[in-house]
Image: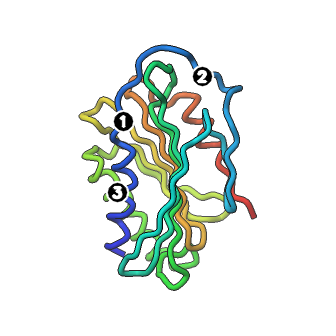
Amino acid sequence: MKKIIPLFTLLVGTVLTISFVHPGKTIHSDDWVPFEDAGCKMLFPKAPANESQTVNTAIGELKLYNHSYEVPDGVQDDNLVYVLSETEFPDTSTINSKNSKEVIDKFFRGAVDGGVSNAHGKLLTEETIQLDGFPGKKFRAGVQDGAAIMTIKTYLVKNKLYMLQVITETKKDFNKSMDKFMRSFMLKH
């Protein structure tokens, strides 16, 4: 379990290498584009960049998929970055939504603590959530010395972890674009 948390925090930390946005063209909600893969679908403000890799770990081979849209300089948006990350754990690992509540709670505890620590942030809020009966966590952290807020929703669906992340300037927290991005996420059955 402890070997999984650094991978999660690596994903969170990678996203935090962004700079603040300069005013310019506004992105309107009508411009949002659908994103879809084998397990989920959602909306992004613009087409996301897609990356994938396979990582060998102590619990086996992890498949990592990262879909992100970083708002370019000169483009005005409520947020700085939008990310959907997917981590597929081996079928033989203990990371699975069918596990006991205790094991799942421990997994999410490590994910939240590791994510906040890796981002050098301060945990602001945390809540247990669900999507279609699958367990999840939503948490918010102040990052970049309080200049930005990182909002993350994670869902463990069988042996796959979905992580939705938005980073925004503190003064723009709780905005409609963040809400639209987070609410648009749907599992495909």
The C terminus lies in quadrant: bottom right
Pick the front one: 15 or 162: 15
Residue carrying label 1: 18
- Corner quadrant of residue 122: top left
CA–CA distance in space, label 3 to label 1: 15 Å
Q: Earlier in the sequence, mark 2 or mark 3?
A: 3
Residue 109 at what x, y percent from top left?
37, 63
Residue 170 at what x, y percent from top left?
37, 28
The disc labelled 1 sits on which kind of residue?
A: Ile
The N terminus lies in quadrant: bottom left
Q: Residue at x 41, y 18 (%)?
A: 22
Q: Is residue 165 left or right of residue 12?
A: right
CA–CA distance in space, label 2 to label 3: 29 Å
Q: Is residue 101 left or right of residue 140?
A: right
State the SS at label 1. loop
Residue carrying label 3: 10
Residue carrying label 2: 27
Give the colour scheme of this rendering. Answer: rainbow
Do the CB atoms of the residues marked 3 and 1 lie less than 8 Å apart?
no
Q: Residue at x 48, y 75 (%)?
A: 95
Q: Is residue 8 left or right of residue 99?
A: left
- Corner quadrant of residue 103: bottom left
Do the CB atoms of the residues marked 2 and 3 lie less than 8 Å apart?
no
